[in-house]
Image (spheres, rainbow, N blue to C red):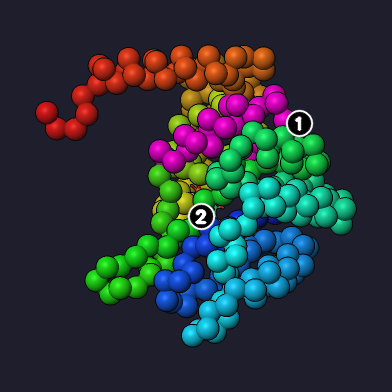
Amino acid sequence: MSTIVPIFLAAPRLDQGGSVGLGHDHMSMPPLTVHTCPVMSEETSAARKYTTRATFSDRPARPAGICAVIRRGRDVEQRHLDIPSRVKDTVTVPVAVKLSPYFSSTAEIASRLDEAGADGLVLFNRFLQPDIDPETLTEVPTVTLSTADESRLPRTWIALLRGRVRASLAATTGVESATDLIKYLLAGADVVMSASALLRHDPEHAGVLLDGLCEWMGRKGFTSVDDVRGMLTVPSGADETARQRADYVSALRQANTTTYGPS
Ligand SMILES: Cc1cc2nc3c(=O)[nH]c(=O)nc-3n(C[C@H](O)[C@H](O)[C@H](O)COP(=O)(O)O)c2cc1C
């Protein structure tokens, strides 16, 4: 089995300007989170150099600055293309890129990464967004675990991208139960990942997910995961605008027959 080197292009502080100006020093997280890959030191030092241009006269230098907020979208995209290319030049194992859900055009960046040689796309990174406590007037760094509902966005994109990119598609976010795992497979995920559920329960929960998948496959008469994978992918060549419109109309029809909240 081949090994995939994950490159985490998660830059919650650098790209989003997260906590800059809130007046607290919760900046222990490196400005650019590039985990477990050889390019880490290079990228973090580049980020450090970049952010030193920000001046906060009354505070020590911070590892993110307003300049990060006004970074051009095209530059952010280019960096996402450059880093995997450099990593690909360095390693011989397949390289997967974990994407942010916040690109202007998810399909375009996925397609460009695919063309640049990314072996896998991981949809999506889930940023740890800090909260604010109005009582203590402080920023509160929090780790909130995901819910199954959050799987809809990555699942929709996986269904759209399957067959349109060469790279393998890995799903991450909101896999709480076997049903969530199955839905991702039906959408077209090659790999399904889970983090929050394993923390919420325990690592043995992975066995629960697999048992649930096997039980469902047996009940439905599937003998191989390959038979399940991609069954509900948006077919190549489908008119996506028409499909989205149709989905919207059917969603509204469904809503008309649904009661929301207490009557
Ligand atoms: C405690 C914790 C630590 C995480 N650390 C990382 C990390 O270092 N790099 C990364 O790309 N994602 C990290 N993630 C994100 C997970 O890999 C995953 O993409 C995200 O939690 C969504 O999946 P889930 O809904 O199964 O939790 C972390 C998540 C949690 C809960």
Image quarter for ligand 1 equals: bottom right
Q: Is residue 104 visible?
A: yes
Q: Is residue 211 magenta?
A: no
Q: Is residue 238 above or below residue 228?
A: above
Q: Name which residue lies at 87% across and 57% down.
A: 90
Position in image of residue 116 (x %, y %): 80, 41
Location of residue 136 in the rendering, given as x and y in whole percent from the top left corner: 28, 74
Q: Main secondary structure of the magenta part?
A: helix
Left or right: 21, with 2 as reference point:
left
Which image quarter holds the N terminus? top right
Q: In the rendered image, which quarter contains the C terminus?
A: top left
Q: Which residues are magenta?
A: 148-170
Three-letter residue code for mark 1: Arg
Q: CA distance from mark 2 to mark 1?
A: 26 Å
Q: Is residue 168 left or right of residue 125?
A: right
- The mark nearer the N terminus, 2 or 1, is 2
Residue where numbered disc 2 is placed: 127
**Does ligand 1 reach within 8 Å of label 1's beta carbon?**
no
Q: On screen, 14 above or below 183?
A: below
Residue at 60% across, 73% down: 54
Determine the residue positioned at 72% across, 30% down: 165
Q: Residue furthest left?
A: 263
Under mark 2, the amino acid is Phe
Residue 164 position, x and y percent, is 70, 26
161 in magenta: yes
Residue 135 image label: none
- Quarter of the image where one finds residue 111: top right
User: Would you call the spot at circle 1 few (<14 residues within 10 Å), some (14-19), or many (20 or more)?
Assistant: some
